[in-house]
């Protein structure tokens, strides 16, 4: 995580600290959970990553097939209600380009929500959060209610997971319009974090062991073991509360795989950061798509969609490093 990301400080109940009299001179001995103890040190190259996570079909569209009469009616309604709409045109283009046949496993609508609206990942980061409602309705046209709820769940997860990258106000500007647009029976009430602690909410520890391991694995894979440790030591040295924020964010939000797989999470975080005018950090997370098990195609897809939405809403991105120019074997830290 970048040292530029800020959040509300949280008291750390970290096993790395044996007492309040923490000795900074021995930080490297304590801050080990996110470094060398988690992963073997092996270089990561795109060719070593699995491509089984997505099914790429040459003429695939994420918009599900409808019976011919219903499809014609659906097409006519779409044409009547959404004429010359640049957002819908962009979504139509990328919804068929991802190559994932199952709409409930696609990421195009989750990435888009992170780029164009005040806080829905791309929409959110681009200060266009009010467009999340249209994104959601477009993605769920003609779908059964339960399928709509799965897509809604993934859109909300994309916003919740990337909020710390562009700020809470943008997230609320994306979420509240969606909440108010939903009928009671349309609401999906599932939350993986709440679900994991609801039976013992008052007694739940701030950092369960399983979440510590998940956060350590995610961060170690994102950076490499040595760089992960160095980054955390750097953050602690300059701002201990930043270190705490990063740990809590990693363990409770970024590394949670209840909805998104690790590479899907990086697709969302990369898109959000691209639209937040932070090109260096955007490169880290775009690289992370591949390091977390995604493909080069998915990295390019997320980057191009993010840039498309940023251009549509005049969001500044800075000089983004194209996927083709990213060094996937670079394991240097940001320290």
Image (tube, rainbow, N blue to C red):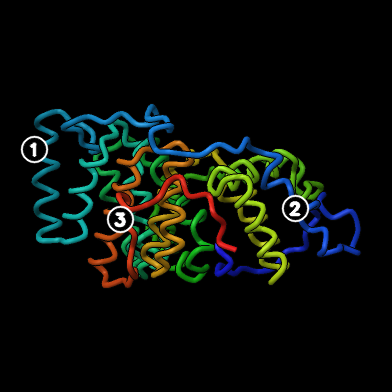
Q: Quadrant of residue 69?
A: top left
331 vs 310, nearest the viewer: 331
Among numbered discs 2 and 3, the one appearing first in the sequence? 2
Mark 2 in CB contact with mark 1 (< 8 angstroms): no
Circles 3 and 1 in contact, beta carbons < 8 Å: no
Quick one: SS at disc 3?
Answer: loop
The label shown at residue 39 is: none
* Residue 114 drawn at (x, y percent): 39, 57
Q: Is residue 98 left or right of residue 272?
A: left
State the SS at label 2.
Answer: loop
Q: Quadrant of the C terminus?
A: bottom right
Q: How far apart are the two marked residues, 3 and 1, measured between alpha carbons?
A: 39 Å
The residue at the point 32 percent across, 53 percent down is: 325
Residue identified by numbered label 2: 31
The label on residue 72 is 1
The dot on residue 322 is 3
The mark closer to the camera, 3 or 1, is: 3
């Amino acid at each position: 995580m970048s040292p530029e990301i800020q959040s509300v400080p949280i008291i750390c109940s970290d096993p790395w600290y044996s007492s309040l009299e923490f000795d900074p001179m021995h930080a490297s001995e304590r801050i080990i959970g996110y470094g060398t103890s988690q992963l073997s040190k092996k270089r990561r190259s795109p060719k070593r990553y699995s491509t089984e996570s997505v099914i790429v079909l040459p003429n695939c569209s994420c918009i599900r097939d409808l019976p011919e009469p219903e499809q014609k009616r659906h097409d006519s309604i779409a044409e009547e209600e959404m004429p010359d709409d640049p957002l819908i045109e962009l979504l139509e283009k990328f919804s068929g380009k991802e190559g994932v046949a199952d709409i409930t496993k696609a990421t195009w609508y989750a990435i888009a929500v992170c780029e164009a609206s005040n806080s829905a990942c791309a929409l959110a980061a681009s200060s266009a959060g009010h467009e999340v409602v249209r994104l959601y309705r477009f993605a769920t046209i003609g779908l059964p209610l339960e399928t709509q709820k799965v897509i809604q769940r993934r859109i909300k997860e994309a916003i919740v997971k990337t909020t710390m990258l562009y700020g809470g106000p943008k997230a609320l500007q994306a979420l509240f319009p969606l909440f108010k647009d939903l009928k009671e029976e349309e609401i999906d009430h599932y939350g993986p974090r709440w679900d994991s602690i609801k039976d013992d909410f008052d007694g739940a520890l701030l950092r369960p062991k399983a979440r510590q391991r998940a956060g350590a694995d995610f961060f170690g894979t994102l950076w490499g073991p040595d760089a992960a440790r160095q980054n955390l030591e750097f953050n602690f040295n300059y701002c201990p509360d930043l270190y705490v924020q990063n740990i809590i964010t990693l363990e409770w939000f970024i590394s949670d795989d209840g909805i998104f797989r690790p590479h899907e999470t990086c697709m969302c975080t990369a898109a959000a950061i691209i639209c937040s005018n932070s090109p260096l950090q955007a490169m880290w997370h775009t690289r992370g798509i591949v390091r977390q098990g995604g493909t080069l195609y998915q990295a390019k897809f997320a980057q191009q969609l993010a840039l498309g939405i940023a251009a549509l809403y005049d969001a500044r991105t800075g000089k983004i490093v194209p996927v083709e120019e990213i060094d996937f074997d670079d394991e240097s830290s940001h320290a």
